Image: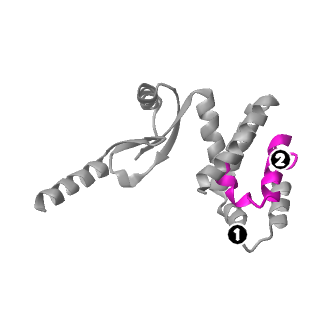
């Protein structure tokens, strides 16, 4: 079974329980913080994925990091995954939870990659573009990549709009290669 399907099997009940207990926004904030922690602390992710470290040790680590600092439901959820030896999937489950949350709330997450930070006017233009393409309320995540040279790339789920200089150069190279064949 694919990692995405397994992550969805754990993320969906968390979303449902959070809604039932009226703690959805608190759990979403906890998951956002967990993802940020994973992005900034590679050691945590490597620890969770390590086959050498015992599952109970990983459960203890998660407990020490999060107990008392996150909603009780989130803490129990982390413990359940650790007890079922699925703690290695926690980052994927967290991302899947956010995807499901955004879908249920009518948001479209879009990753906008540019060479420089977006100013307010440009960000509004990207929000309008995402709204027109998806028909949903946009949530913009900014990424900076100097290798683009110029332009932008917008990723929304399985869609991508590549209007970058490096993308145009890649297209030009492919068209030259096709003509030479």
The quadrant the C terminus occupies is: bottom left
Q: Are marks 2 and 1 in contact (CB under 8 Å)?
A: no
Q: Main secondary structure of the magenta part?
A: helix
Is residue 71 a member of the stretch shown in magenta?
yes
Q: Is residue 68 above or below residue 86?
A: above
Is residue 19 a member of the stretch shown in magenta?
no
Within the image, what quadrant is residue 104 found in? top right
Q: Nearer the viewer, residue 148 or 163?
A: 163
> As drawn, which residue projects farthest toward the front?
1
Q: Nearer the viewer, residue 82 or 64?
A: 82
Report x, y in % for residue 93. 67, 49
User: Which residue is tagged 1?
Assistant: 50
The quadrant the N terminus occupies is: bottom right
Question: Which residue is located at x 76 percent, y 30 percent?
Answer: 19
- Tell me the distance, in whole angstroms, between the alpha carbons under discs 2 and 1: 21 Å
* SS category of the residue bearing label 2: helix
* Residue 19 at least partly seen: yes
Question: Which residue is located at x 59 percent, y 51 percent?
Answer: 4
Report x, y in % for residue 97. 66, 42
């Amino acid at each position: 079974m694919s990692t995405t399907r397994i992550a969805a099997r754990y993320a969906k009940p968390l979303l449902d329980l959070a809604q039932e207990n009226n703690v959805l926004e608190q759990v979403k904030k906890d998951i956002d913080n967990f993802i940020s922690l994973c992005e900034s602390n590679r050691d945590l992710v490597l620890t969770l994925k390590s086959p050498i470290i015992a599952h109970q040790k990983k459960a203890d680590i998660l407990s020490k990091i999060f107990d008392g600092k996150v909603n009780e439901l989130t803490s129990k959820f982390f413990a359940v995954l650790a007890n079922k030896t699925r703690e290695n999937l926690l980052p994927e489950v967290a991302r899947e939870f956010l995807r499901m949350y955004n879908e249920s709330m009518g948001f479209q997450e879009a990753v906008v990659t540019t060479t420089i930070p977006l100013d307010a006017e440009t960000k509004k233009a990207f929000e309008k573009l995402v709204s027109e393409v998806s028909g949903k309320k946009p949530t913009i995540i900014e990424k900076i990549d100097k290798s683009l040279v110029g332009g932008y790339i917008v990723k929304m789920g399985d869609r991508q709009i590549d209007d970058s200089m490096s993308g145009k150069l890649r297209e030009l190279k492919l068209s030259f290669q096709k003509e030479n064949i």
